[in-house]
Amino acid sequence: MDLSTKIAGVTFRVGLMNASGALCVTQAELEALGESDAGAIVTKSMTPLAREGNPLPRYVAIDGGSINSMGLPNLGYPAYAKLIPGLKRFKRPVVASLAGLHPDDFLEGAKALNAAGPDLVEVNLSCPNIPGKPQIGYDFDETERLLEAIRDIFTIPFGVKLPPYFDPIHHHKIAEVLQRIGVTFVTVINSVGNTLVVDPEQERVVIKPKGGFGGLGGRIIKPVALANVRAFWKIWGDRIPIIGTGGVENGTDIFEHVLCGASAVQIGTILVEEGVGVFRRLAQEVTECLERKGYPSLMSCRGKLQEMD
Ligand code: SIN
C-alpha cells in the first residue's frame, strides 16, 4: 500500500511520524525513531538552553489518554543543531520543532536551524505548560508578529503547531494570519491545554506542575483533533498541508484524520505507551483499513469525509 505523502515539497515514504514531545528528546530516542518504521523524525521542541522541564510527576496515563505538563525538557538548540545532520543517515525527513520562552528565542533558533539543515521546521505556538507563558497561538496579533520575524530568517520551509480552537471564527482568523505569512504546513492539534484530572481516592491532582493543570492527549481528544483538521481543510483544501495530531491509537484513527483532510498523521500518547514498534502496527492497520475500503493509497482518501444533505 502506498502510504506516502508530500509536505512542503518534502516526500515522506510513510505519512506517520511521532508528535513532537513523544520519545524524541535524547539522541538515543531520536535514533530509535530513525531505526523504526516512522516516516519521519520529529525532535522535541527546543529552546536556546537545555531545560530539565517541570517537576515530576508530570506525565500520567489516564483512562482514554494522558495528561502532561512536561515544561519543554530538551537539550537546547545547539545540541539539536549538532545532532540533526547525523539523523539524516536514517533517510527520512527530519522535522525540527522550534519553541521559545521569548520571541527572540525563536529568532535565534531559526538561525541555528538554518545551519543545521532539517528538512522542515515545526514552530510550536502552543505549549500550554510553561507557568506564566500563554500559548502564542491564541493571540493572533502576537502570532503574526512572531511569524513575520521568523519568516525573514528561515531558509528552510516552516509550518506551525497550533493549539486546538473551539470556534469557527478562530479557525478563520488564524487561517488568515497563516496565509498572509505563507506557512507551508500546519500541525493540529497540540494537547488540549490546562485541563485537570482528579484522583478521588487521594483527593488530589495527578501531576505536580501548575497545581495539576496540564495538556490532555490521547483517545479522548480525537474529536477535538478531527474537528480542527476538518475546519482547516474546509478553509484551505489542499493549499496548505495539514498534519493531524490527536487521539490516534489504531489504523482507523489514521484513516479518520486523513478523511478529514490530513496529509500526514502524528502519534503522541500511544507512542509513549507502546514504544516505537507502534509505527509498524499502525502502518499495517491503516493498510488493512484502506484495502478493505478499496482505496489505492493513503492520500487517495484525503478530505473525502461526507457531510449530510
Ligand atoms: C511540554 O513540554 O510541556 C509539552 C510541549 C507542548 O505541549 O508543546
Image (tube, rainbow, N blue to C red):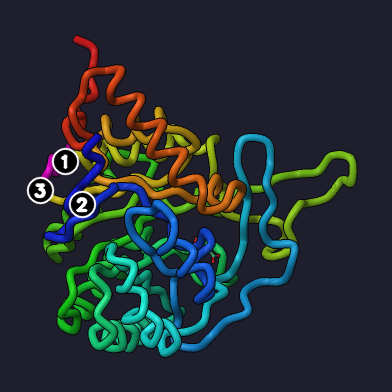
Q: Which residues are magenta?
A: 234-239
Say whether residue 182 is left or right of residue 271. Answer: left
Q: Callout 1: 10 Å neighbours few (<14), some, many (20+)?
A: some
**Residue 235 got which mark?**
1
Residue denoted by label 3: 239
Q: Nearer the viewer, residue 144 or 268?
A: 268
* Mark 3 / mark 2, whichever is N-terminal: 2
Which residue type does callout 1 highlight? Answer: Ile
Residue displayed at 53% across by 36% down: 219
Residue displayed at 60% across by 65% down: 70
Q: Is residue 214 above or below residue 151?
A: above
Which residue type does callout 3 highlight? Answer: Arg
Query: For numbered disc 1, what is the local secondary structure?
Result: helix
Residue denoted by label 2: 175
* Mark 1 / mark 2, whichever is N-terminal: 2
Residue displayed at 42% across by 78% down: 100
The residue furthest right is 202
